Image (cartoon, rainbow, N blue to C red):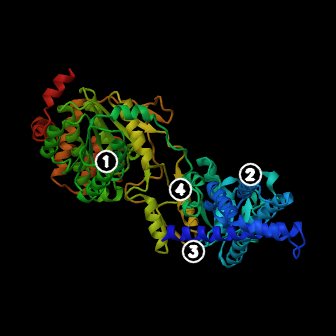
Amino acid sequence: MEMRMHRLKQVAVMAIDACIVIMSEYIALAMRFDITNIPEEYLLNMQSYLLADIVITLGVFLITGLYNRILSLMSFGDLVKLMEAVAASGAIVCFYKFLIVANMPRSFYILYIIFLFLLETGFRLGIRLYFYYRNTVRKLGRNVRTMLVGAGSGAYLLMREIANNPNAENRIVCVVDDDRTKWGSTIRGIKIVGGRDMIQEAVKKHRIDEIIIAIPSLSDEERKELIDICNKTSCVVRILPEIATSLHGQLVSSIRDVEVSDIIGREAVKINQKEVKSFLHGKRVLITGGGGSIGSELCRQIMAAGPENLIIFDIYENNAYDIQQELIRKYGKDRLAVIIGSVRDKDKLEQVFDRYKPQIVFHAAAHKHVPLMEDSPCEAIKNNCLGTLNAVHMADKYGVENFVLISTDKAVRPTNVMGASKRICEMIMQNFAANSKTKFAAVRFGNVLGSNGSVVPLFLKQINEGGPVTVTHKDITRFFMTIPEAVSLVLQASYYAGGGEIFVLDMGEPVRIYDLAEKIIMLKGLRPGKDIEIKITGLRPGEKLYEEVLMDEEGMKKTPNDLIMIGQPIQMDYMDFMTSLNWLISEAESNIGAEAMKKAVAKVCDTYTPDIKRDTYVMPREAAKTSPKAMEKIGIDLGHIVEDAG
C-alpha cells in the first residue's frame, strides 16, 4: 500500500511538471512577443515538438533522481539538483531543435530555461512552505515543551525530524549549548539561550516539560554531569544516542530514557577481545547457573566467541529455557546443551563432566540474596559451599583447563551468611588451586545493574506504585557495574588466570544508594520527598554500610588491563580447612538452627562477623576425628590430595 501511494505521488508530480513545461514554453514565447501577437509559425512549431520536450524534461528529471526526493523536506541541495536537471533538459531541447532546424527565436530557449527553473522551483518551494506552516500550526498544539541540550548536527537533525513528524509530541522552545559563540543565535529558528548554567533558569522561564540531551558524542562522565544538572529540575530527561545520528528518519524513535548506568557515569570496562576470543574459540565450555543474570550473559558472550560446545547447567528450568531459546534463534542448536540439575547433586554433576568433558568451567550457580540467606543459612552453605566443592572437585578430577568462580565483594570481611559462604567458596578454590593442574581463579565484583533482585528494579517498581522508595540507611554505599561489564571481566580474568588468584575490577567510586534513589525518582520527572517519599527502613540483618573488594592481607597486583587487579592467594593449612569445611557442610545438612549455623560459619570463615556472639559456639572435637570418613561421603579423597600436595 505504501509503495502504491509513493508511485501515485510520483505520477502526480510528473503530471504537474509536464504542465510546467507547457506553461514555460508559452510564457517564453509570450515574453519574446506580445501575448496577443505571437507569430503563428512559432506557435505551431512549439506545439509540434511539445510532447518531445515534455518526454525529454521528465526523462532527465527521472534520471537525476528528482522524483525520489521528498518535496516537503526540500533543501538547498535539492534546489541545486533541480537547477542542474533543468539546465541539462533545456540544453538537450535546444540541441535537438537546432539539429532538425526547428524554426524558433534564439531568445526563446533562454527564456524557456529561466521560466522552467522558476516555475519548478516555485512549485517545490510551495509544497515545502505548505508543510512548514502546517507543522508550525500543529506544533502550537503540542503540549510537551522541550529543551534541547546541544546545538550541533545531532540537535539539528532531531529538530528537523520533530518539525516534520506529525506524530511527534515535542515542541522545541529553546536550546542550550556550552559554545559561547552560539549564544543568542538560532538553530532552525529556535534561540540558543546559553550554556548548561542556564538550564534551570531556562526551564522556569520557558515552562519546560522535557529535556533532551542531543549530544551523541558525550563521554560517560560528561553525560553524568549533564544529567545531574538536568535532574535538579522537575523535567523528564531523555537522551539522543550516538547511533541515532546515522539513522535517517528515525531520530525521534531513537530517543531513549536516561538509564541508571548514565547517572553512575563510569567509563565502560575495556577488554582485549582478541585474547578472550582466542581463549574460548573451539573449546567445550560449561556454565553452572547459566540461566541467571550473570550466567545468561556469559552464555551470550561465549557463544559469540565460537566455542565447540556450550553446556548450560541450571536448577531453574524457566531461566534455562529462556536463554536456550535465545541462543538457538541466533546460533542454532548444534553446539548447545542444556541440562537441568543442582550443583549439590554430585552424581548428576559428574555425569555432565564425564559426558561433555568441559575444558573451561564458569561456576555462577549460587544463592545470592543476603536477607533470605540470613533466614536460611543452612541453604547458603549447602548450595554455595557444597555446590562449589562439588564443581571444583569435578574440575580437578576431569582435568578441566580453567575454572572461574563468580564471587562478590560481600566476601570481604563479610557481615552476612551469603558473603561468608562466598568467601568459603574462594578458599575452596584457592586450596584446590595449590594442588591441581587446573587453573582455578575467582572474580569478585559489586552489584550488577538490572540483575534479578538488585536495588534498581525494586526502586522502579516502588516508584510505579507511587512510593515510598525504601532505603535501609541514608549513608549506605555500593559499587555498581553493568552485566556486560561484569561478564567481560570474568572472561578476561579467565585468560589471565594462572591459579589461585582473585580478580578484582576497579569499579570507580562507590555510589550512595540514597542519592541513587533520588536520581531515579527525578529521572521519572518526579520530586523526591514531595511526589515520591524516600523511607529509611534501617539496615537489614547482615547488611553493612559499605562494601570492600580486597582484604588487606591479599595484597594487590596489576594485570595487562589497568582496570583489573589480582589479589594474591592467602596461605592456609589445607588439611585443617578441609576438615572444618566437611564439618560445616555436615552441620548444614543436619539443618541446625539459624543462629547455630551462623556461629558454625564463623568458625570456618574467621573474617565473618555475624551479629551474634561467636565465643559461645565451639567446633566439636569429634569433627576432626571423623572428617576423613565424612569427606569420602561427599567424594573428597583427603589422603590423595595431601599426598599430591607433598
Examine the rendered structure and indicate whether residue 517 appears above or below residue 422. Answer: below
What residue does disc 3 label?
531
Disc marking residue 99: 2
Q: Marks 4 and 2: which is nearer the front? A: 2
- Residue 518 lies, in percent from the top left, at 56, 63
- Residue 511 lies, in percent from the top left, at 53, 52
Residue drawn 83% across the image and 61% down it: 108
The mark that comes first in sequence, 1 or 2, is: 2
Q: How many marks?
A: 4
Residue drawn 81% across the image and 67% down it: 41
What residue does disc 4 label?
475
Crowd tier of the residue under label 2, counting other residues whose Cα lies within 10 Å: few below 14, some 14–19, many 20 or above? few
Q: Nearer the viewer, residue 284 or 560?
A: 284
Q: Marks 2 and 3: which is nearer the front? A: 2
What is the distance, in whole Å, between disc 3 and disc 4 at their CAs? 22 Å
The mark that comes first in sequence, 4 or 1, is: 1
Q: Quick check: 35 left or right of 430? A: right
The mark that comes first in sequence, 1 or 3, is: 1
What is the distance, in whole Å, between disc 1 and disc 3 at their CAs? 47 Å
The mark that comes first in sequence, 3 or 4, is: 4
Image quadrant where residue 593 sits: bottom left
For badge 4, the amino acid type reads Asp
Image quadrant where residue 437 sits: top left
Residue drawn 45% across the image and 43% down it: 548
What is the distance, in whole Å, between disc 1 and disc 2 at their CAs? 65 Å
Examine the rendered structure and indicate whether residue 385 appears above or below residue 516. Answer: above
Q: Are marks 1 and 2 in contact (CB under 8 Å)?
A: no
